Image (cartoon, rainbow, N blue to C red):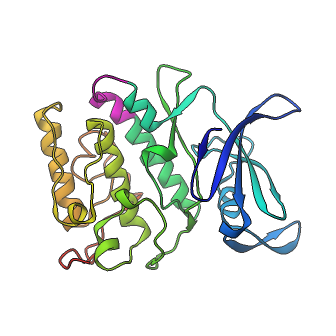
């Protein structure tokens, strides 16, 4: 078994035809949300996670950071997803924790840049993952350069410019406005979750442990970073809690990622209107 959560289990397997490594995810029907979708010319109510993965599926000549949906089965009691399983790989939590010391900044830069590019791709296809965390990021380790893969769209939904109120996602990765106003937007939440992931890679721990800390506290930045990077990271959290920044240009990220300043494509921004003054 590869993993188990509140809504289902994931097993490792191989496809019979060609021995391709696959992940087999089983989700109980009682936990399935559905959405209308045209399949084979007919409007059908399909599992939301299936609809999202089909929208993200790359063309044959393309590659994608999203782990590909290979097949799916809508059974009486459960839904079965058959997914690509990269080999060798491990999730980002394992990748960080297997080492004695925190990740070096140059390696964190490689991973963060891939994450930003991956989420730009996901958002550009109209999908909002909603649960970006170290457990949902795979790192392929077949080469000297780690490759990022994104998994588990079980909390995902379609991207819109509207405000969301459902409490999907992981508590400790939630952004301040979720606790204060019990609502959030896709873009600000994504940049916040990426910031939490970045902190975890550089410090081997998460920045906040409670709703109070998420809303009011500044994370404890250790001594293992260079002075410039530590200063940039402090600026990132200040900006993330109080102002609007694109993720590519946000302090603490721009210091790690050398993006072309002329690239105007924006992944996410903290909302200037996000209420950050009143507690839950």
Image height check: is 144 above or below 275? Answer: above
In x, y percent, where is residue 137? Answer: 49, 43
Q: Nearer the viewer, residue 65 or 60?
A: 65
**Residue at 30% across, 36% down:** 204
In this rendering, does residue 94 appear at all? yes
Q: Residue at x 87, y 33 (%)?
A: 16
Q: Residue at x 41, y 36 (%)?
A: 111
Q: Position of residue 96 (x, y in %)?
A: 38, 32
Rendering coords of residue 11 (x, y %):
69, 40
Point out the stretch of residues depicted in magenta: 99-110
Q: Quadrant of residue 275?
A: bottom left
Quadrant location of the N terminus?
top right
Residue 114 on the magenta segment:
no
Q: Does residue 59 lie above or below 97 as drawn?
A: below
Residue 204 vertical placement versus 27 (above, below)? above
Q: Which corner quadrant holds the C terminus?
A: bottom left
For residue 53, side relative to residue 236 (left or right): right
Q: Is residue 262 visible?
A: no
108 drawn magenta: yes
């Amino acid at each position: 078994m590869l993993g188990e959560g509140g809504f289902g289990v994931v097993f490792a397997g191989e496809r019979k035809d060609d021995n391709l490594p696959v992940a087999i995810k089983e989700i109980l029907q009682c936990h399935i949300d559905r959405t209308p979708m045209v399949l084979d010319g007919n409007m059908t109510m399909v599992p939301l996670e299936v609809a999202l993965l089909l929208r993200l599926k790359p063309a044959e000549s393309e590659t994608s950071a999203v782990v590909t949906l290979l097949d799916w089965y809508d059974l009486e009691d459960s839904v079965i997803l058959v997914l690509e399983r990269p080999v060798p790989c491990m999730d980002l939590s394992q990748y960080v924790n297997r080492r004695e010391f925190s990740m070096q900044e140059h390696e964190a830069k490689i991973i963060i840049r891939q994450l930003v590019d991956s989420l730009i791709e996901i958002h550009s296809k109209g999908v909002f993952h909603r649960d970006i965390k170290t457990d949902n990021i795979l790192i392929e380790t077949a080469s000297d350069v780690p490759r990022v893969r994104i998994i588990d769209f079980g909390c995902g939904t379609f991207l819109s410019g509207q405000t969301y109120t459902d409490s999907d996602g992981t508590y400790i990765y939630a952004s301040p406005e979720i606790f204060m106003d019990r609502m959030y937007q896709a873009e600000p939440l994504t940049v916040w979750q990426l910031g939490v992931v970045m902190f975890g890679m550089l410090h081997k721990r998460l920045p906040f442990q409670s709703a109070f800390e998420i809303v009011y506290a500044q994370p404890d930045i250790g001594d293992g970073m260079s002075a410039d990077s530590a200063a940039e990271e402090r600026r990132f959290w200040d900006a993330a809690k109080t102002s609007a920044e694109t993720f590519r240009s946000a302090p603490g990220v721009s210091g790690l990622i050398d993006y072309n300043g002329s690239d105007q494509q924006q992944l996410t921004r903290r909302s200037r209107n996000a209420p950050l003054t009143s507690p839950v």
